[in-house]
């Protein structure tokens, strides 16, 4: 789910340096007393696939609309190719946008919809030039032969391709996507995600996606910008955000996480010794020294293992007694909820391939739940 794909990301998952195509510089947007975007600072690399991810009201759509030119910043700057465009209208920016509901013209054919922006250009393009560009982009989105279809004759997935074709035919520097797959069913959404990635790779255009779907952002993005309360909470590759969240907010929003309150005892060489709520001392990874003793330990559900009581521990492992309260079998894996007493409830995801362990523990069974130090991360308490 966290596999990176673009030429901008090297084998370690790190974004390689590249030209900056757009920037937010101390950008703030207010609607009356409401601060929708608060001092955003972000450089968007040429050719990358960047996603804004966050819950409703976090500021992600406001950021996208400021890039598009539908909103002007109250303070700060927005740059595209080094030029300040904060007060430039949308039609004068090298940007196109695909809306959640596509905004296609139902009275026009597919070809007329795609060519609409070309017909507004000044100086005017000839009919043959427009026809050639439309035909080329139809082939790109695999809709050859659909030129004369009406929009209402197209499926949801086909309509999305028409909207994409209309956006890319003008060869924008930035293609903005406002939750374009929200209206599609789960199967079609997965297919369209793959098609969108293939399209972005072949065109080399910078894509900026707004979504509240974690899996969508993790599977498609070179980098993800996590938004919260109008601010950027953290920016990084999908793997960086998943493995090294910098706050409880990011840890709980990007994937599932067990977050355990603890007290810091000591820290050295990237490892911290902490005491959990019931007194058990454990080791965990740490990046930097937390400013106070109250900390939290983050452990992903797939990093926990369930075993019969008294089973031997892995090297540098920790085990807690627990009781299974819920079990959900999902074919290739099972998900459990365990009551670990003073520590609280723990979520566990066990694959059939996980060390050959059985995944058929039963509700009510007393077990040991364990993890390695390398699979836990210490965060400063929010």
Image (cartoon, rainbow, N blue to C red):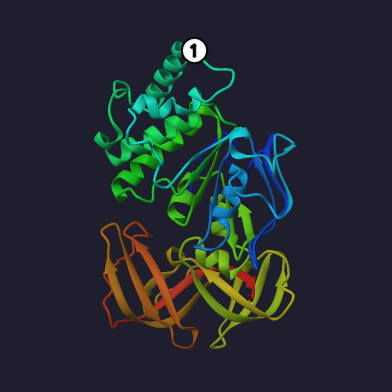
Q: Residue at x 35, y 50 (%)?
A: 183
Relative to 308, say whether 299 is above or below. above
Left or right: 257 in relation to 17: left
Closer-to-camera residue (372/229): 229
Q: Residue at x 57, y 48 (%)?
A: 64
Q: Is residue 117 above or below residue 236?
A: above
Identify the residue under disc 1: 126
Residue 378: where, in percent of width, then height? 62, 70
Q: Position of residue 13 (x, y in %)?
A: 58, 45
User: In the figure, is residue 263 to the left or right of 180?
Assistant: right
Between 339 and 360, the one nearer to me in the picture = 339
**Relative to residue 327, is residue 241 depicted above or below?**
above
> How many numbered marks have been drawn onto this rendered protein structure?
1
Please name whichever residue, 278 or 119, is drawn nearer the observer in this view of the structure. Answer: 119
Give the quadrant of residue 301.
bottom left
Q: In the picture, which quadrant includes the C terminus?
A: bottom right
Asked whether residue 237 is in view, the answer is yes
- Disc 1 is placed on an element classified as loop
Compared across the picture, whether 137 is left or right of 26 comes to left
Residue at 43% over, 34% down: 164
**Label 1 crowd (10 A; few <14 / some 14-19 / many >=20):** few
**Would you place residue 272 above or below residue 15 in this image?**
below
Q: Position of residue 291 (x, y in %)?
A: 74, 75
**Within the image, what quadrant is residue 284 found in?**
bottom right
Q: Visible in this render: residue 202?
A: no
Camera-side residue of 92 and 203: 92
In percent of width and height, residue 323 lies at: 35, 83
């Amino acid at each position: 789910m966290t596999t990176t794909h673009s030429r901008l990301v090297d084998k370690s998952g790190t974004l390689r340096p590249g030209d900056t195509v757009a920037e937010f510089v101390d950008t703030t947007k207010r609607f009356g007393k409401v601060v929708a975007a608060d001092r955003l600072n972000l450089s968007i690399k040429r050719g990358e696939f960047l996603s804004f991810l966050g819950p409703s009201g976090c500021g992600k759509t406001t950021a996208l609309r400021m890039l598009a030119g539908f909103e002007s910043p109250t303070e700060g700057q927005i740059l595209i190719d080094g030029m300040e465009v904060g007060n430039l209208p949308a039609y004068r920016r090298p940007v196109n946008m695909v809306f959640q509901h596509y905004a296609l013209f139902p009275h026009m054919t597919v070809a007329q919809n795609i060519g609409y922006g070309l017909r507004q250009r000044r100086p005017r393009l000839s009919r043959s030039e427009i026809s050639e560009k439309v035909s080329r982009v139809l082939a790109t989105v695999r809709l050859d032969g659909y030129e004369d279809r009406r929009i209402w004759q197209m499926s949801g997935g086909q309509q999305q391709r028409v909207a994409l074709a209309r956006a890319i035919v003008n060869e924008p520097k930035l293609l903005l996507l406002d939750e374009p797959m929200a209206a599609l069913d789960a199967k079609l959404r997965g297919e369209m995600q793959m098609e969108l990635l293939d399209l972005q790779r072949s065109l080399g255009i910078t894509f900026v996606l707004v979504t509240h779907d974690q899996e969508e952002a993790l599977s498609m993005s070179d980098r993800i910008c996590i938004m919260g309360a109008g601010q950027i909470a953290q920016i990084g590759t999908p793997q960086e955000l998943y493995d090294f969240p910098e706050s409880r907010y990011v840890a709980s929003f990007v994937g599932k996480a067990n977050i355990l309150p603890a007290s810091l005892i000591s820290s050295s060489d990237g490892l911290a010794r902490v005491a959990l709520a019931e007194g058990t001392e454990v080791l965990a990874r740490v990046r930097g020294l937390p400013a106070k003793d109250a900390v939290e330990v983050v452990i992903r559900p797939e990093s926990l293992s369930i075993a019969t009581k008294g089973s031997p521990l892995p090297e540098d492992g920790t085990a807690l007694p627990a009781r299974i309260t819920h079990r959900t079998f999902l074919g290739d894996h099972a998900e459990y909820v365990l009551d670990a007493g003073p520590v609280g409830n723990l979520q566990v995801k066990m694959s059939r391939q996980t060390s050959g362990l059985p995944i058929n523990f039963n509700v009510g069974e007393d077990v040991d739940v364990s993890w390695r130090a390398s699979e836990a991360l210490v965060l400063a308490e929010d």
